[in-house]
Structures are given as C-alpha cells and as structure tokens.
Amino acid sequence: MKTSSAFGLKAKISLKTPSLLAMTAAALMLFAGSLPVGHADAERMDLETHRFLIEKLETVIKETPRGDTTRVPALLRLADLFSERARLLSMQEIEAGCFDPSQSAPEKKAQCLVSKEDRRKAISYYEMALSESSGASQSRILFHLAHLYEMNGDNKKAESLYRRILSLGPKHFTKAVLGQSQAGLGEIAFREKRFSEAKRQFELSLQNSATPRKGWIQYRIAWCDLNLGRAEAGKQRLLGILKTPSLLALESSTSSDGVKPDASFQEDIARDLT
C-alpha cells in the first residue's frame, strides 16, 4: 500500500484527496436538488433563453417602484435566473478545466469567472428582495443566499445565515432545508480544514432523516477521519458507502427498479481507495 498525504495527513493507505473538480461538482449537485419549484422550468432553458429573460426582467424591475406587489416576485425570479445560469455556467467551466491547476492561462482564468459574477448578481437581487419582503418569502431567500455566499467563498456570511436558519427552526423551514444548512456548516468547516468541527456538523445533519445526499455527507465524514489521523475509520466508511446502493444514489438517479447508483460518485470513491 502507498503512503498518502491528504491535507497534511500521512497514513499507510492508498487514498487520495478528493479533487477540487469533484468537490465543486458535488456542491452544485447538492444545491440543484434543493431548488424550489420555480427552478424546474429554468433548468430546461438554455443560456440564451436565460439571457433574454434576464434582460426583460431587469427592465421591468427598473420601472417598478418599491411597494408594488409585483416587485418582490420579479426580484426573486430574476435572482433565480442568475443563480440557475451560474450553475449551468459552472458545469461548463468544470468541463473546460477551470478547476484543473494545470490550466492557468490568463484567458482561462477570465473564462472561469463568469459563473461567479452571475452568483454575485443573484446575491444582490436576493438581498434586495430580502429587504423588501417579510414572512415566507424571507425564509426562502435566506437559504439561497447562504448557498450562494458559500459558493462564492464568503464563508462568514454563509455560516451566519446557516446558523440563523437553524435557529429559526422547523416553524420557518422544511426539515430538508434544515438538514442542508447543517451540512453547509460542515462543508464550510471542511474547506477551512477544521475537520473535527466539520465532522460534528456533518453527523448532526445525518440525524435529520430529510437531509438529502447522505452518501456525499458520509464521504465527507470519511475524509474528516482521514485528515484527523483515523485512517482505518475513514477507509471503512468509504467501503461502507460503496457497499450501500442508497448512499451511492442521487435523488434524481432513479429507475423503475428503485434507486440507481451515481456512476461518477461511485468511481470517485473507488478511485480514492486505489
């Protein structure tokens, strides 16, 4: 067996640190599974249709005064469109090698900033809608803002909102959103290499039966163990995921026979163990 180093861990196991590309793609999939009903139509649209609708809505919002009953729904729809387009662009950026360290040409870096700019715009419109709304609309906005802050690297704001969501609890949010918020705290801690805290938050998220993507969360816990020097525990957890079809499946990966393992995720775990 080879000696592997993951975030400073050295252990006699043949494991490799999950790539930034895999981490980013998984984060996008996690959020995609939590999109509200309004995003279902957006996902079927191409980038050109997004551009057309965004331009129209920006014009409408400029001409709609604060207090008008149509303004907040329009702001939310526009923010949704920017957020969804950012997700689509991010997938293109992954395919273009934006998260490959060997791709460092200036033109490549510029190309890879497009989705981030769309997320900034989505954030600005969600923040605008938050300041002009109340009640259920605010609850919906908070989770989207937290995720977008996290995706754009503003961990302090993301963490603050995730904690606010958890403090407001089930009276304002679904169990799934609460579970994702707990996992969001784990993800932030993981990326900041606070592995003990990350593991604690991930384990708390798994106590919620409605938390989606449990396999990915188990994967993260495995890597927390590995980085904390618990190599055997981490390896056994990875093997456990491979042996459990339900942990390898995404909610969207279903068939007439039931859950269908996600091939890419399965391959990533198998590769980590070789």
Image: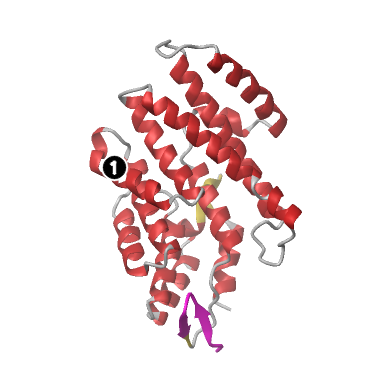
Find out whether residue 6 is within the magenta segment: yes
Is any part of residue 261 visible from this angle? no
**Residue shown at 71% from the left, 62% from the top:** 104
Closer to the camera in the image, 172 or 152: 152
Closer to the camera in the image, 237 or 71: 71
Closer to the camera in the image, 50 or 65: 65
Find out whether residue 2 is within the magenta segment: yes
Residue under label 1 = 164
Image coords of residue 48 (percent x, y) = 72, 30
| Relative to 20, residue 91 above or below | above
Across the whole image, how many numbered discs are drawn on residues? Answer: 1
Image coords of residue 183 (percent x, y) = 37, 53
Image coords of residue 62 (percent x, y) = 55, 16
Segment colored magenta: 1-10
**Residue shown at 41% from the left, 43% from the top:** 146
88 lies left or right of 63? right
Name the amino acid type tagged 1.
Arg
